[in-house]
Amino acid sequence: MKLDYSRALLKEDVKNYQEEVSKIHESLMNGTCKGNDYIGWIRWPYDYDKEEFERIKDAAREIRENADVLLVCGIGGSYLGARSAIEMMNGLYPDDKVEIIYTGNTLSSTYISQVLKHIEGKSVYCNVISKSGTTTETAVAFRLFEQFIVEKYGVEESKKRILATTDKARGTLKELADAKGYRTFVIPDDIGGRYSVFTAVGLLPIAASGIDIDELMKGCQKAYEDFKDPDLDKNIAYQYAVVRRIMEKQGKCVERLVTYEPQMTMIAEWWKQLFGESEGKEGKGLFPASVTFTTDLHSMGQFIQEGTKLLFETLLTVENPQEDMIFPADKDNLDHMNYLAGKNIDWINKMACQGTIAAHVDTGNVPNVVLSMKDNSAYSYGYMIYFFFRACAVSVLMLDVNPFNQPGVEVYKKNMFKLLGKI
Ligand code: PA5
């Protein structure tokens, strides 16, 4: 992964923050930082439970052998990571035997009914994922899909087809799974939802979609090695952490993640949760937004170019696309497109990207930070998520905010529970 902030229009040197960053790094590594009860993700690339990792691979193999559909039932940190990985690597129209369907992430009666109809007549497995075990969206959907599976396959067969990822010892879902004999996988106590994609939370669905999770963990390990030295000359995760704070000092209040691949749109959703939930506290933080270009250039491009100067862009680009093709010549050329004949579509996409950077930075005065990934592989995905974990933690700690809690999320739940009559 590479970071280029030469077009970020910085008015100060990133290295001015070395002392502050080194102290924060030290506090993360020795466990004295704010929120230090949730820093299990730091050493997870090496410390992950190897036995459980093998159980995940075994379960994924079984799902791939027997299922037409895997229902992944979870929300927020128990959902976005797996979906971001699966879509980034397998694309939006995967040619795979197992169809992954995301549920438990909405209370839309229409959506749930349509999924129930869609899975009729198919071989269905369900992985329900919830750390607390009490999340309403997940619990509502799970009851419906559990009943569907039990009715269709009977109690015994359901024990094979329903897998629960939850707390290792406590909580409603753990109790339910144990009582009914479902297989369980563990969400570690010291890893919060938005940092959990490389635990069973993400790894089971990711592996069940056919992705090599050994490679994913290798990518995380390489990132751990690359970011263990806080030296701002070398550590691009910490450079990015600092650039974000400088942007804020220069008056920006929105960071917009830009991708040029529709299959990376869910990466942006995952990234928004990571940064939004980690940073948006105590009246502080950059608002994380996202666009997929070139699609959104035709809707949001105008505002970015000439609207209020409240945002900067962080591009997440891919050097080598998963697939490419040559734009064909046409003998009649009635669409006047022959000037592109013989060019690769990815080259056209990259030219659009370069032209947009120039328009936004040089003409629009909108700072651009460019992060480039080599490819869409599991290894690159693992590297990228760990890059963002480290960058996020350091960037948020620079605000003197706890990056690992989310007290504000509870407020709407209290109101909703009151209205729903929850006792
Ligand atoms: O990051 C978070 O804590 C949240 O997004 C949670 O992951 C989300 O609310 C789901 O929670 P749970 O896993 O307890 O069902």
Image (spheres, grey):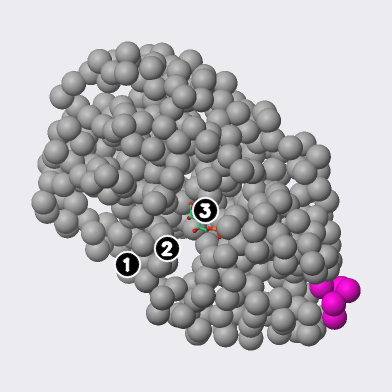
Identity, as a three-letter code, of the amino acid under mark 1: Asp
Residue 235 percent coordinates (x, y) = 43, 20
Looking at the image, is mark 2 or mark 1 nearer the viewer? 1
Question: In the rendering, at what x and y percent does residue 310 appear?
Answer: 16, 47
- Give the structural element (helix, strand or loop) at label 3: helix
Q: Which residue is mark 1?
A: 335
**Image vertical order of residue 62 relative to residue 396, above or below:** below
N-term-proximal mark, 3 vs 1 = 3
Q: Residue at x 50, y 76 (%)?
A: 422
Q: Which residue is mark 2?
A: 330
Give how far apart the Cα atoms at labels 3 and 1 are.
46 Å
Q: CA distance from mark 2 to mark 1?
A: 9 Å
Image mark for residue 77 = 3
Instruction: Please tell me which of labels 2 and 1 falls first in the chain.
Output: 2
The residue type indicated by label 3 comes to Gly
Picture coordinates of residue 68, whole percent (x, y): 75, 71
Q: Nearer the viewer, residue 44 or 300?
A: 44
- Mark 3 close to ligand 1, CB under 8 Å: yes
Residue 239 falls left or right of residue 76: left
Q: Which residues are magenta?
A: 154-158
Q: Between 386 and 375, which is closer to the camera in this rendering? A: 386
Distance from label 3 to label 2 (Cα)? 48 Å
Which residue occupies the extreme right position in the image? 156
Task: Tell whether 177 sits left or right of 364.
Answer: right
Other residues around mark 3 within 10 Å, as few (<14) / some (14–19) / many (≥20): many
Judged by depth in the image, the label closer to the viewer, 3 or 2, is: 3
For marks 3 and 1, give the one nearer the viewer.
3
